[in-house]
Image: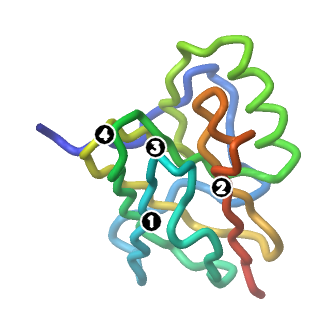
Amino acid sequence: MAPAQAGPGHSGAPHGAPVGKPGDPKLVKRIVTVTMNDDMRFVPDRIDVRKGETVRFVVRNIGTIKHEMVLGTEKEIKEHADVMLKFPDMEHEDENAVTVHPGLVGELVWQFTSAGPVTFACLVPGHYDAGMVGQLRVRP
């Protein structure tokens, strides 16, 4: 089975602009592996990156249910989590997100263009509220 991958947005609206932009895979300087599990946790849940850095996130779902990793500001993540509660069957195909089914691995390549905090979360209904959230610190 092929790995899950991020793709174009489901709403047509640009996502993630305040926290960066899709990265060029040829410019990746670092690979960060993030594991998602059914305890509703990301491991690691704190990651430091540098402004301008392009990172390949290798996202492993070791659980038995679907999970995802969505990048955004804290406000964007909270608002999007509320929308997901209203539309629980919606699947993300945003450039700043990757959905990974059980036992699979997905990738997300992202360039961080601004210093400051970035949130990542699983927005499958109920997962964010259960604590499936992490923080990226983008240093100057």
Residue 52, position as x, y percentages in the image: 63, 78
- Neighbor class of circle 1 (other Cα within 10 Å; few <14, some 14-19, many 20+) is some
Residue for badge 2: 120
Give the side of residue 118 with respect to residue 49, left or right. Answer: right
Name the residue at the front extreme.
39
Secondary structure of residue under mark 2: strand
Residue 46, position as x, y percentages in the image: 65, 75
The structure residue drawn at horizontal position 28% and vertical position 51%, both measured from the top left corner, is: 105
Contact? badges 1 and 2 (CB < 8 Å): yes
Residue for badge 3: 98
Contact? badges 4 and 2 (CB < 8 Å): no
Residue for badge 4: 102
Observer-nearest residue: 37 or 58? 37
The structure residue drawn at horizontal position 70% and vertical position 50%, both measured from the top left corner, is: 131
Question: In the rendered view, how is the structure colored?
Answer: rainbow
Label number found at residue 66: none
Q: CA distance from mark 2 to mark 3?
A: 11 Å
Q: CA distance from mark 4 to mark 1?
A: 14 Å
In the image, what residue type sits under mark 2?
Phe
Contact? badges 2 and 3 (CB < 8 Å): no
In the image, what residue type sits under mark 1?
Val
In the image, what residue type sits under mark 4?
Pro
Secondary structure of residue under mark 3: strand
Q: CA distance from mark 4 to mark 2?
A: 19 Å
Name the residue at the right extreme.
75
Q: CA distance from mark 1 to mark 2?
A: 11 Å
The structure residue drawn at horizontal position 61% and vertical position 69%, both measured from the top left corner, is: 45
Residue for badge 1: 34
Q: Earlier in the sequence, mark 4 or mark 2?
A: 4
